[in-house]
Image (cartoon, grey):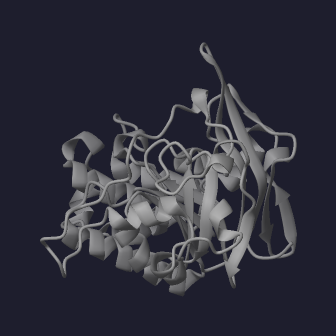
Amino acid sequence: MGGLLTVRDLTLRFSTDEGLITAVDGVSFDLEPGEVLGLVGESGSGKSVTAKSLMRLNSGNARYGPESRMHLHLDGEDIDILALQGARAMRKVRGDIISMIFQEPMASFAPAISIGAQMVEMLQLHRGLSRKEAKRRSVEMLERVGISEAARRFDQYAFELSGGMRQRAMIAMALSTRPRLLIADEPTTALDVTIQAQVIDLMKDLVREFGMAIIFITHDLGVIAQTADRVAVMYLGNIVEKGPVADVIRRAGHPYTRGLISALPKLDDLDSPLMPVPGDIPSPLERPSGCVFHTRCPVAEARCRTVIPETRQLRSGHRAACHLNAADEVAL
């Protein structure tokens, strides 16, 4: 095992009053230091649950499958994430090795403690900085994510900031510890396009500067095209396609990926209609048999309803789980 992160056969189920829900089903991927991996898919596809699994942040009724494996590889040390026990052991992973930017900024801030005090506390806990040095780094990071008058904002509370500014402060807090892996869950959703570009540029700078790896979660393939090195497309808890981002976007091998690309607006042809993926993503309580996408697939055949497709290599590093790829029966 090499690289920074290895995930193999990750399966996660939740016990609910309605029954057992499979949220993630046999997901596998690797991540190298300094690499940006995009996780793409509609809401409910399992992107955030997969990412939270890396920090064991899913709720107490979550159950990992017996074959699930998640390992971090750091300076010759192998850390089995699923084997870690207790808050002290998990603290090394949460906030030290891995930081996460959540979709909802208020989930990251204690309302009765100033933003600066929370950033300083985290830096003292995970990086052992003095209060003075922790404050200096915190103000610097607030400035780098585009917050004006950062020294004054440092002493404010989350409820005193606008939604977009809270989002930027949360990004600054996650980046301030300079983690080895940053999980960014829809980090630019609440930001206008100019700040969005600024934040994406900042992440790229930190990747170059510190060799930090990023898992970038979004439903927007346009953002992934500008940000990621590789992309994994998720649908109903499965990775249906993964590979180098340019190859996947230009030569998509799965009908779902092609549907997501067709749904993007085309700036060079403003009159062309948007083509949404037909239908809705099924409930995880009612997972389709066979290929999980067959209920919405425009090219589905009889076998797609009963036979789970193998994940096949299409080109170097580019794999997709679709029956039609087996004999090149559709143009890729």
- Residue 199, given in percent of the width and then of the height, sits at 34, 71
Residue placed furthest toward the top: 17
- Between 78 and 222, the residue placed more toward the observer is 222
Q: Residue at x 44, y 83 (%)?
A: 205
303 above or below 34?
Answer: above
Q: Where 122 falls versus 33 (above or below)? A: above
Residue at horizontal 60 percent and vertical 78 percent from the top: 35
Q: Is residue 264 left or right of residue 184?
A: left
Residue 128 visible? The answer is no
* Left-right relation of 249 to 180: left
Residue at (24, 60) in percent of width and height: 191
Classify residue 229 by image quadrant: bottom right
Q: State which quarter of the image contains the C terminus.
A: bottom right
Q: Is residue 62 left or right of residue 157?
A: right
Q: Can residue 106 be seen?
A: yes
Residue 163: x %, y % from top left: 23, 48
Residue 243 in picture, x, y percent from top left: 61, 75
Write down the quadrant of residue 141 in the picture.
Answer: bottom left
